[in-house]
Amino acid sequence: MRRWPRLIVAPKAIGGFLAGLLLWWGLSGPYDEFLAGMAEPLVRALERFPATHLQAWNGYILVFRPEFLPGAPKPAVSAGHLTANIVLLSALFATNRRPVSLRNVSAFALAALILAGIHVLAVVANVESIYAWDLGAWSSAHYGIVERRMWEAATNFYTLVGAFGSAFLLWWLSCTLSANASLSHDPPQRRASAGQR
Amino acid sequence: MAANSTRRRRALFAAKFVAFLVVFYAFVAIGAVDERLIVPFTAGITRVSVAGMRIVDRNVHAVGTTIASDRFAMDVKNGCNAVETMMLFAAAVLAFPASARSRIIGLAVGLPVIQLVNVVRLATLYWIGSRHASWFEIFHMGVWQTAIILIGVAMFAIWSATNAALATTDRRA
């Protein structure tokens, strides 16, 4: 029996998955506005002449600069792609023992807060990647090759493995700190002796 | 003492996991690797998916990494070829303390299962896109992407629990 994690985690994971999906989908509008608001000063801090304005719109974060021609299509970052890892985080935390306990909910809230910080940085990296690569001569004039490669790598790393890797890691580290995971890897006899003490 | 040891092992796992992710990413980020390995691999996954889909819809065909018919077309890009799930799973298996044999078995079983699930993902995404286009993005970004990672995590959990139990048995012996 102990060789396999308890199958009870499957319905809990599905419940957490659905809750996360509702959270991600239901709050996407205000959350995208929050991301745009938090990322804008960070992008501006990287500029010699701060001019970037970010605005959430219909699942995207639109990028505005005074140089862009009025009426021309605005570069945009797909916010949903950057933030979908909250669904994974919710599903993973739901598999913990007593998922609705204050301890687990607090740990989830803390992990979600850290994830929100990661989302803000992901928006910054994506905007910088647009500036570095997608604006033709303007990009070449304002970004050196090292900067271009760096922002491209940051964006691709997040897209490919960083988004879901960070959610998995936050859950794993939370389990490490609280020793609260239902998929515990502790040897059974050690847990028993710890309980006796 | 036992709790400290467990925490140390888990923290070590986390550090190794990140290191493997960085190495895997650095490998697939090489242009030649993407061109000669990832793109052909993605085209292969696309062909396998289309072969399955043609059982119910003869109009579907594969063009490179694109699944297309007269009503809908979908390009399978990085992020939809499940390579990222394979990397996450492989990083977790390699970071976890286990024998080389266990790791090989874990990877040999886990990686094909991930791709099998991905074939189902591509087929259902195509079906949703061609018939319920307004639902495509939510299933594409929110549902399937997370579901396939969860399946990877579940397989890792089962594999690692089996290995932890075996390691305990070995220590007792």
Image (tube, grey):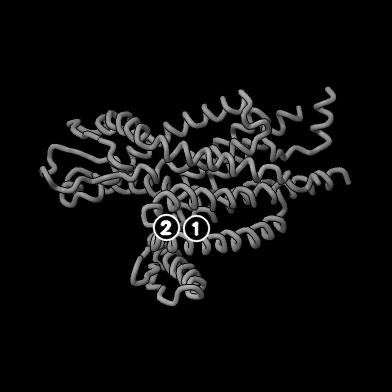
Q: Position of residue B96 (x, y in %)?
A: 66, 46
Q: Position of residue A6 (x, y in %)?
A: 73, 44
Q: Which of marks 2 and 1 precedes in the sequence?
A: 2
Does residue A190 appear left or right of residue B157 in this picture? right
The image position of residue B105, as x and y in percent, is 69, 60
Left-right relation of B107 to B45: right
Q: Helix or strand or loop: what does disc 1 sit on?
A: helix
- Chain letter belonging to callout 1: B
Q: Are marks 1 and 2 on the same chain?
A: yes
Instruction: Pick whichever, A74 or B58, lies toward us.
Output: B58
Residue B55: x, y in percent?
A: 51, 75
Q: Is residue B8 left or right of residue B76?
A: right
Tell me the element at label 2: loop
Which residue in the structure is indicated by mark 2? B78
The residue pinned by badge 1 equals B83
B96 or B123, which lies in front? B123
Q: Residues within 10 Å of mark 1 (few under 14, many from 20)?
A: many
Residue B46 seen in this snapshot = yes
Pointers 1 and 2 in contact (CB under 8 A)? yes
Viewer-side residue, A153 vs A88: A88
- Looking at the image, residue A79 lies above or below residue B68: above
Graded by Cα atoms within 10 Å as few (under 14), some (14 to 19) or many (20 or more), the crowding at tag 2 reads some
- Residue found 83% across the figure and 47% down from its top: B170
Q: Residue at x 40, y 57 (%)?
A: B132
* Identity, as a three-letter code, of the amino acid under mark 2: Asn
Q: Amino acid at mark 1?
A: Val
**Left or right placement of residue B30 versus residue A126 in this view:** right
